[in-house]
Image (spheres, grey):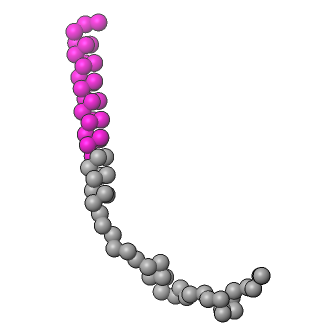
């Protein structure tokens, strides 16, 4: 092969390496950001305001003993 072909292949290899290196750095930065996020605990009852508790005295509970 000629020198221009080798140069072109080297350029493509360097470009591929650069793209993969930047993608890896972005993924690692995203993981680091996610690991530092602190969420406050929320009750499951806060999800739906019309949600009601079902107790054993409720007529909706069946007695299958």
Residue 58 in the figure: left or right of residue 36: right
Residue 37 in the figure: left or right of residue 59: left
Magenta run includes residue 5: yes
Residue depicted at x 27% and y 56%: 33
Q: Residue furthest front?
A: 65
What kind of secondary structure does the magenta stretch mostly adopt?
Answer: helix
Picture quadrant where residue 17 is located: top left
Residue depicted at x 30% and y 35%: 20
Q: Give the extent of the magenta segment.
A: 1-26
Task: Give whichever of 15, 64 is nearer the camera.
Answer: 64
Picture quadrant where residue 37 is located: bottom left
Residue 14 in the figure: left or right of residue 64: left
Residue depicted at x 65% and y 89%: 56
Residue depicted at x 26% and y 43%: 25
Image location (x, y in percent) of residue 61? 69, 86
Task: Give whichever of 48, 36 is nearer the camera.
Answer: 36
In the picture, which quadrant includes the N terminus?
top left
Query: Is residue 8 in view from this perspective?
Result: yes
Query: Is residue 47 in view from this perspective?
Result: no
Image location (x, y in percent) of residue 58? 66, 92
Q: Residue furthest right?
A: 65
Magenta run includes residue 42: no
Image location (x, y in percent) of residue 40? 34, 73
- Please, is residue 15 above or below residue 33 in the view? above
Tally of marks = 0
In the picture, which quadrant includes the C terminus?
bottom right
Task: Give whichever of 35, 14 is nearer the camera.
Answer: 35
Image location (x, y in percent) of residue 24? 29, 40
């Amino acid at each position: 092969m000629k020198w221009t072909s080798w140069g072109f292949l080297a350029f493509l290899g360097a470009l591929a390496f650069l793209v993969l290196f930047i993608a890896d750095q972005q993924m690692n930065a995203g993981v680091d950001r996610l690991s530092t996020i602190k969420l406050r605990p929320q009750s499951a009852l806060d999800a739906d305001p019309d949600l009601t508790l079902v107790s054993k005295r409720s007529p909706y509970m069946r007695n299958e003993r």
